[in-house]
Amino acid sequence: MLAAYSIHVRYAIKSMLLIVVAKLEGIKIMAHPGLKDGPIYLDYNATTPVDPAVVDAMLPYLSTYFGNPSSTHAYAQPTRIAMATAREQVAQLLGCSAEEIIFTSCGSESNALAIRGAALANRFHGNHIITQVTEHPAVINVCKALTRLHGFRVTYLPVDKFGRINPAELEAAIEEQTTLISIMYANNETGTMQPISELADIARRHRVLLHTDASQVVGKVPIDVQHLGVDFLTVTGHKFYAPKGIGALYVRRGLQLEPLLYGGGQETGLRAGTENIAFMVAMARRPYRHVKS
Ligand SMILES: Cc1ncc(COP(=O)(O)O)c(C=O)c1O
């Protein structure tokens, strides 16, 4: 029964089948340099090793192409093109357009930008948020901070024995003052997947925004944000063979967010700071190959 809901169980079964097929076909499986001669690594939802092909893809943006993409001279050209390509590739992975992708430094930042950003941008419409008890601390602690610093009320929905929330309970929890729902797509401990498109239907019917933390899903199973119907979706690169320190947030076109960082106009004003081109290239590289294959 758990296998029906758990992305981790399904992914482990799929990986084992691939290894068996490779062995039968006589395909040699190369050990990652970081895992060679070490104990068997079973903590891929904590983090993944960086794919050597990803390292190759990002190296030119550390060793050679250094220009600030916002500059107006020729040195900006290669990094500007690399950033646009990476954004396009991440957008293809999620089924959205490139302008709807905001690069961040990690999944925690994407969650904070979505939840704090949407709550504050819509505070004149209401001060109530709904989430659930098994969210990652990167969601729970943002909600707690919104209560502590800005007086938001937060409903923490319970989960059943499989770790799933009941869509009817979500609908019953929506109030006049509710502006945002944040429910993770897959849990980092159990792999339990929530019925996000069903929850998105409910949110849309009540004109409430829906954010999902898809940190444990992107790069493992195909995602289409249009089909899912979510408004915001969190991505983090180090769960799918990119380095730690790069993430993204899908923001449906036209939605307003209060930024976390103020400064230059990078990332359409939603995330100030000179861009980390090498890591953007790294994050885009792996899932693009994965999806194409
Ligand atoms: C479900 C979930 N959300 C958010 C995060 C935070 O991601 P990051 O480490 O990139 O900040 C993690 C990472 O452990 C996670 O598993």
Image (cartoon, helix red, strand yellow):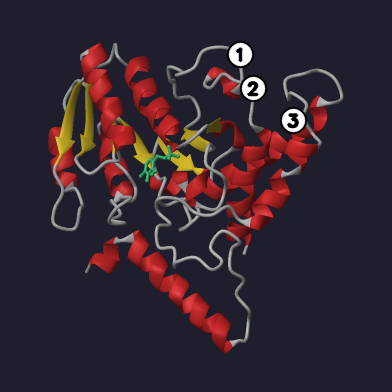
Q: Distance between the residues labelled 1 and 2?
A: 8 Å
Quadrant position of the N terminus in the picture: bottom left
In this view, the residue farthest toward the right is 74
Quadrant position of the C terminus in the picture: bottom right
**Could you tell me the amino acid type at mark 1?**
Gly
Residue 291 at x, y percent in the picture: 58, 58
Residue 150 at x, y percent in the picture: 25, 12
Q: Distance between the residues labelled 3 and 2?
A: 12 Å
Nearest to the observer: residue 161 or residue 166: 161
- Element type at marker 2? loop
Disc 3 or 1, which lies upstream in sequence?
A: 3
In this view, the residue farthest toward the front is 37
Disc 3 or 2, which lies upstream in sequence?
A: 3
Residue 147 at x, y percent in the picture: 21, 19
Tell me where residue 231 sits by quadrant: top left
Residue drawn at (56%, 17%), measured in percent from left and top?
Answer: 269
What residue is pinned by disc 2? 274
Which-is-in-front pick, marks 1 and 2? Answer: 2
**Could you tell me the amino acid type at mark 3?**
Arg
Q: Check whether the beta carbons of the residues at disc 1 and disc 2 lie within 8 A of each other.
A: yes
Mark 3 residue's CB less than 8 Å from ligand 1: no
Mark identifier at residue 146: none
**Could you tell me the amino acid type at mark 2?**
Thr
What residue is pinned by disc 3? 80
Q: Check whether the beta carbons of the residues at disc 3 and disc 2 lie within 8 A of each other.
A: no
Q: In this view, does 144 lie above or below 96?
A: above
